[in-house]
Image (cartoon, rainbow, N blue to C red):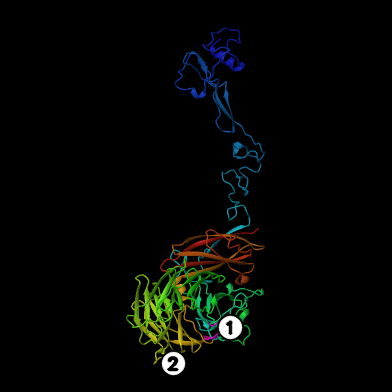
Amino acid sequence: MHARSCIVALSLVLVACGSSTGVDFPPRRGIDAGMRPTLDAGRVDAAIPPCPACDDGVFCNGAEGCAPDGTCIVAPQPSCDDADECTIDRCDLARDACTHVAEDRDLDGDGFSACAGDCDDRDANVAPDRLEVCDGRDQDCDGSSDEGALSECLDCRPGCRRVPVPGETGWDLEGDTAGVTIDPSGELTLSTSRTETFFAWIANTAFATITRLDTRDGRQAAEYDSVLRDGSNHASPTGEECETERRGGNCPSRTAVDLRGAVYVANRAFFAQGTVTKIAGIESDCIDRNGNGVIDTSRDRDGDGVIERTVPGEFLGQTDECLLWTVDVGGINGVPRAIAVDAAGTVWVGLFNERRAVQLDPDDGRVIRSVDLPRTTIGGFYPYGAAADGRGQVWFVEISTATIVAIDTATGRLARMDTAPGRVAGCTGSYGIAVDADDRVWLAGFTCGAVFRFDQTTRTWSEFPLPDSGVTRGIAADASGRVYVASSHEYYRVLPSGSVEASPPISRVTILDANRGVVQRIWGTTLDPLPGRGTTGVGLDSAGMVWLVNQESATATRVDPRTGLSREFPTGIGPYTYSDFTGYALRTFTAPNGYYRTIVPGCAVGPTEWEHVTWDATVPAGTRLELRARTADDVADLGSATWVGPFIARPTDLVAMPGPVGTGRHLELEIQLFSDGGTRAPSIEDLVVQYNCP
């Protein structure tokens, strides 16, 4: 028998050739029935030389070779696996080679075998012609999961939606916006003139009311009590006439307007409990206390431009729902006089008789910190006026001494104290205080015929004589490098006896160049007087008009600073306000800001689960972007809904604190942009609102 025949027989009967046939062939050396060494497949390499004496020439039973001692060894049988599950793999003895026969198996009966693209032949719901179902699996065997089945939110909730803002038409500035514009790249950002304010808040000292004048037409838009006596404070009764030598009345004076148009009123209440009151500037910020679905507040019902007690609904007094809160500030006869709002929105109040300043939380009037003011040449610093700058400081001024002190609003630490030297004018004096675009502090000289300017950067004083201006009281600065000084009298002298000698009251405003201190114009001269008498305060509106508060005539005068054209409008009795009563300084120098509002429709029926907002924005250092939101089922009800926010995280979780925002079917979203001044401003490209209809 030939060796080839023996190998075939070996393959068939699985026994050694020779011993099973009775034919005696010489056994291979080292291979017999009792010992058949097997070669490790991993060791078949060039180190084992071929051995013709051992090789039987058959592929399917493995390659034979020679061990170092000359004995024959046998390798494992060859693996014919082609790693294709769609073939049957074997070593064909007849061909003496590996064969791969296609096997068409459809184990799940879906019409596709694993060999024909079925990526899961155990599930009839998975095959190349199946539709994707949103479950994280690949139903159509294309290598991807859930394509075409995901919601807009890229999850498996069929009611989840994502709404881009703005839409295809871009940002709409015709709606409810202020202080914003669209830059050349199409992003929403702060405008270069961020001084939008349409109301002057004037405190009427005599009977403790606040008049809100519309600066666009001079009409009285509303009038409020200066305190809310709700049992949480010790304010004096409303309607009492102000007394300065004994207890009587709440005696409001300075007002300060915040970035949302709300006003804070310092009620001096001599010999009684002084207070601070907050009045909402936007009706949506008022509180529907009686739950009747509308805001009951002062309005000019008959349209005559004057709030009259005899017309029902024009003056509501203590039932006015835009009176937000009144809090006690200081002790009895503490006399809250100076007041200002800083860039963060907190309120600073100077307590005249206690010679200290307190910082209040704007939400509820809670005292955040109290700061004792330093001693001066007259024994203690008596704060009379206040103004916040763009460097995170609030400045207080004394009356007549031209001494100022700064407090860091973030830490409450005293930053510095300075006094004008009085070298040029030959005297020093002070009354009103203002900050200009370069954060320089300005003082009206009062009985000293000058104004004083303190430069924080160089720590130097400048003095500018005003021999033709008279008794300067209020002072303000604009964004174009001008300073405005209000004068109440030609002269005002305190005699040795303690009595006062004064000229008849006048209405006058002096306009200076803020850099050179040169007088540009004086409106209200003896030969060309302005209407009104006894001007104590001066403020600016967004149209560039100058507003004068006239204490003696109970009026306010609007003056065009370019032409001197003027018009007088009535206020309450005894107006006495010379602070930032329009909010111009805060918006322009301290904390420029703007806002944009839009309404996003939600689910057609049922509640809407408002989830989050994402946005693409650029927010440089010294700027910030905040969101507020409120919901209602009907668009008409959004105005009376409560705002929730601010949200500052990105993305914004509308369910987490300070949320949730509610489940109304419409969402009103307010984007607020803030800058600490200068040229820096945030900008927003777009945002996406996500909600779910369960």
Q: Which residues are magenta?
A: 242-251
Q: Circle 2 sits on which residue? A: 504
Tag 2 and tag 1, C-beta contact below 8 Å: no
User: Does residue 20 sit above or below 502 in this rendering?
Assistant: above
Magenta portion: prevailing SS class: loop
Label annotation for residue 505: none
In this picture, residue 526 sits left or right of residue 617: left
Determine if the magenta segment contains residue 248: yes
Q: Secondary structure at mark 1?
A: loop
Q: Secondary structure at mark 2?
A: loop
Label annotation for residue 300: 1
Residue 193 in sight in this render: no
Q: Amino acid at mark 2?
A: Pro
**Which residue is depicted at the point 46% across and 65% down?**
623
User: Does residue 196 sit above or below 506 in this rendering?
Assistant: above
Q: Amino acid at mark 1?
A: Asp
Q: CA distance from mark 2 to mark 1?
A: 34 Å
- Seen as rendered, the residue at the extreme front is 379
Q: Earlier in the sequence, mark 2 or mark 1?
A: 1
Assign the N terminus to one quadrant of the image.
Answer: top right
Which residue is nearer to you in this view: 209 or 666? 209
